Each structure stands twice: as structure tokens, then as C-alpha cells.
Image (cartoon, rainbow, N blue to C red):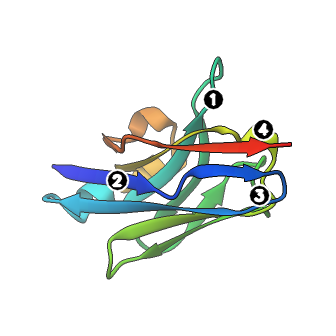
Amino acid sequence: QVQLQESGGGSVQAGGSLRLSCAVSGSGLPSSSDCVGWFREAPRKEREGVATINRGGSTTYADSVQGRFTISQDNNKNTVYLQMNSLKPEDTAMYYCAAGPPWACGATWRSYIYWGQGTQVSVSS
């Protein structure tokens, strides 16, 4: 069983920055967490993939955050980060991290097995 715990959410003004953290722990590592992704869900909107990273460090980004968000990992701490810069009001959402097998990095959110509880990000104009 893999556990994920997000932190770092909050309220900022447009143009500001936040760094989210996702601490990954539990048995089954590393195979169950070969891919870690960040997702977000806003009210009345579908869950959206934001960024992914695999154990080799390869990353993917949604077009809407490309150039503004950076996903990274610290393998020693089993933590994945999401640095969010130039935040916009449309980035407001609950942000979740999730872990899955290696092929999940190229698939939809349904491919991820383990999920955190989420952290709220609110961006005001």
C-alpha cells in the first residue's frame, strides 16, 4: 500500500507562486509509484492532468501550465514537488498527487492507483 500526502496549497494573488509537495510512503515502492502525477479539479469541471514525472525524471505538462509549472522529485525524500509560478485565477482548484505504474505517465487519471487527499489552491485576480 502506498500513501501520498500533499501540502503547500494556499491563497495567492495572480502572478504569485506556490510550491506543492507530495510525500510518498508505504510498502510496494518503487514499482507502485513509478509514475507520479499532479492533477487538479475545479468545481463543475473535469479532473485535469497537470504534470507527471517518472523515476527516470522524464516529465510531461499540460499545455495550460507549460512554462509556468515545474515538476521535480527528491528520491532521497520520496517527495515530488510542483513549483507553480505566474499563477492565474483559472489555476484555482483542488490539487491532487497520484502514483501509478510506469505507463500511467502517458495515460489518463484512471491509470493511477494511489491518490492523496488533495490541497486547495486559490488564486485571486
- The residue at which mark 1 appears reads as 42
Query: Sequence-wise, which precedes: disc 3 or disc 2?
Result: 2
Q: Which residue is mark 4?
A: 90
> Where is residue 17, by image quadrant?
bottom right
- Residue at the extreme top of the image, as rendered: 44
Q: Position of residue 118 (x, y in %)?
A: 44, 42
Quadrant including the C terminus: top right
The mark nearer the N terminus, 2 or 1, is 2
Q: Of the residues tagged 3 and 2, which is closer to the observer?
A: 2
Residue under label 2, please give it: 5
Where disc 2 sits, the SS reads: strand
Marks 1 and 4, how far apart at CA: 9 Å
Q: Which amino acid lies under the numbered mark 2 shown in the image of this protein?
A: Gln
Q: Residue at 46% x, 73% y: name it.
A: 73
Q: Is residue 16 above or below residue 91?
A: below
- Image disc number at residue 66: 3
Disc with the residue nearer the chain's start (4 vs 2): 2
- Residue in the image at 75% along x and 63% along y: 85
Marks 3/4: CA–CA distance: 14 Å
Q: Residues within 10 Å of mark 3 (few under 14, many from 20)?
A: few
| Above or below for 97 versus 26 | above
Indicate whether 10 appears above or below 81. above
As measured in the structure, the alpha-carbon distance from the residue carrying label 3 to the one carrying label 2 is: 24 Å
Q: Earlier in the sequence, mark 1 or mark 4?
A: 1
Quadrant of residue 110 within the rendered picture: top left
Question: Number of numbered discs present?
Answer: 4
- Location of residue 36 in the rendering, given as x and y in whole percent from the top left corner: 43, 56
What amino acid is found at the position of numbered circle 3 in the picture? Gln
Q: Residue at x 13, y 59 (%)?
A: 27
Q: Secondary structure at mark 1?
A: loop
Secondary structure under tag 3 reads loop
Circle number at residue 70: none
